[in-house]
Image (spheres, grey):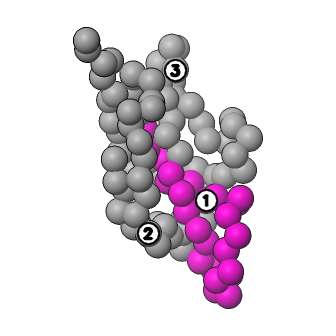
Amino acid sequence: MIVPPFRIRRFGRTYRSPTELRIDLGTIAPGQYRLVAVHNFQLEDRNPDLNECLAGIFLAARRADGGWEEAESFPVECRTLAVIGTIEIAAATG
């Protein structure tokens, strides 16, 4: 899957993903997922504009209880900005 570059305005700042992001869905377990735009604190951002931050994508799985995984619940140092889509990964056949 290819996520094109995007820009989100939230929390008084602009969050951007300046290049397309590629996700190999062949390595993902079957199920429903949300594509969540996140502020990624792990990437070094050398942009001198402190009101503009780097964004990434967190693939949040639907849990067995019907809720969704939250990016902040994982040790990936990011903050949820917006849900930008949902996808369903089908089980492989044969």
Q: Mark 2 points at which residue?
A: 19
Q: Quadrant of the C terminus?
A: top left
Q: Name the residue under label 1.
A: 39
Quadrant of residue 12 within the rendered picture = bottom right
Q: Earlier in the sequence, mark 2 or mark 3?
A: 2
Residue farthest bottom in this picture: 48
CB atoms at circles 2 and 1 under 8 Å apart? Answer: no
Find out whether residue 24 is within the magenta segment.
Answer: no
The residue under the point 54% across, 57% down is: 56
Q: Residue 27, position in %: x, y? A: 45, 32
Residue type pointed to by label 3: Arg
Q: Mark 1 falls on what kind of element?
A: strand
Q: Mark 2 falls on what kind of element?
A: loop
Q: Residue 85, position in %: x, y? A: 35, 45
Q: Distance between the residues labelled 2 and 3?
A: 30 Å
What is the crowding at mark 1: few (fewer than 14 residues within 10 Å), some, or many (at least 20)? many
**Which stretch is magenta?**
34-57
Residue type pointed to by label 1: His
Residue type pointed to by label 2: Thr
